[in-house]
Image (cartoon, rainbow, N blue to C red):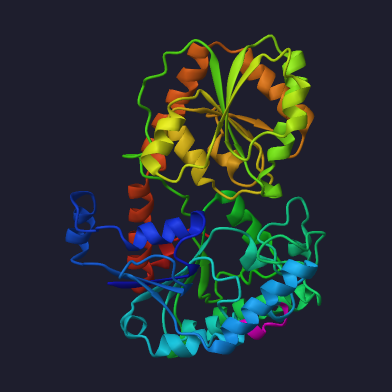
Amino acid sequence: MKILHINTYDKAGGAEQFAFDFVHQDFTTEKYQKYFDENNEKIETKFIVKRKKTDSPKVEALPRPLSSHFLEKFDKGIYKLFKHTFFSDLSVLKKLHFTFENLQKNEFYQNADVIHLHNIHYDFFDLNDLIKISKQKPIIWTLHDMWAMTGGEAYTFENENYKKGIGKTPYQAFHPLLNPIIDRRQNYLEQKKRIYFAINQLKGNEKHNFVFVPVSNWLKECLEASYIYPNKTENQEVEKNISIQTIQNGIDTTIFKNLNQRNWNTKRILFFNSDNPYKGAALFETLLPQLNQQTDTIFELFVVGKELSKTVLHSFSNTSKIKITHLKPIYDRQKMNELYNSVDILVFPSRAENFSLLVLEAMAAGIFIIGSTAGGIKEQLANQRGILFENENQKDLLYKINLVFNMSLEEIREKGKTASLFVNENWSVEKMRLKYLKLYHQILNDGLDLVDG
């Protein structure tokens, strides 16, 4: 069984790491061998990208014309100077990449059994090519964000225009949308609807299964309620090519794990201070002076990334109950797990999330999490595996922090252990990949009656 993964980059964020790790997984190991023995199969993988950042032989960048490189750099220059984009918003770059034509010449694509898509935005993919590929191969599209169902945003926050057939939202500069000079989001929303409906109606030799795989139940519900989703009728007699199967993210629990070494006597909090406004860091940072005034709890705060502002630090420098340690970003996974095991609590105020890998890693390491209700975080922290505050509500965040401060260290650590056990039993990367292997097998054998959706 040959699986071709396609993504814009091989290294960048969580989606890229997800695909890169999947492609490089050794499926001959004992934990996977039982599955292949039962199905008498072996698996080969390849990763095709727009831009290659690693030296992996399993990753291949498709050729691009010089005009594509030039216009992309020109567009970046426009954005740097004027905070607007131009060519990408007219679909010029998508068409110039000739992605489908180059795939036709690619030997692995020609022999692939399944095409597994990930993040194909950032002007890599002309969406009209989805219809052409669907006529040739079955497709699985793992949805790491909302882009597949919006006019261009990866998330729309509380705005539900994507359900109503309205392409525009108040968010014009949320990746991959970068404040276009000409706003064509309505056109792109209608284009997506037309493309998905066309794929859904393919028949005969052109008919192949197409499965959306949202990585959270929250995103599945968004997709089913969206304007572009073609299967809203209850008529079961209508044959459909498109279906949905939720497969939640998993993490490597051999790396991220509870080392059971928490023996300090002061509550320790971890906080990632990101420049990305959608990670919500300012919500927590700006309440620190108030927290310092209100609480009787002396605690340690580990800040990863950007240092806290001088204004915040100055506001409680003389009467602080907080011992602050600033840390640079950590990219080594083992060292990241060591950091997780050096704290008790994670404050995670993100405004936009799907099914956060960082939250899973922290849970696996035994951390008790105070997280926002954004996206799939609600699923991750359900049933007291953490504590939720209303997204973007600073008052509620402060209240929930004080609730946790009123818990004993023993109670916090016991809740962290419970969360760690749950991740090991339900959200390990091995369990996730086995679900994908099963899905590959199903779509190749028309077993989609087993697929949710």
- Can residue 445 be seen? no
Could you tell me how many numbered marks the image carries? 0
Q: What residue is rendered at 49% in x and 46% in y?
A: 357
Q: Is residue 441 left or right of residue 309?
A: left
Q: Is residue 27 magenta?
A: no
Q: Is residue 133 left or right of residue 127?
A: left
- Considering depth in this image, is 343 or 436 the residue closer to the camera? 343
Q: Return the x and y of residue 115 as percentages of the image width and height.
A: 41, 74
Overall secondary structure of the magenta section: helix
Q: Quadrant of residue 332?
A: top left
- Please say if 185 is above or below 99: above
Q: Return the x and y of residue 452 as percentages of the image width and height.
A: 49, 58
Q: What residue is rendered at 77% in x and 77% in y?
A: 184
Q: What residue is rendered at 54% in x and 21% in y?
A: 268
The residue range painted magenta reads 89-93
Q: Quadrant of the N terminus?
A: bottom left
- Please say if 132 is above or below 292: below
- Considering depth in this image, is 113 or 100 the residue closer to the camera? 100
Q: What residue is rendered at 61% in x and 83% in y?
A: 70
Q: Return the x and y of residue 331 as percentages of the image width and height.
A: 44, 46
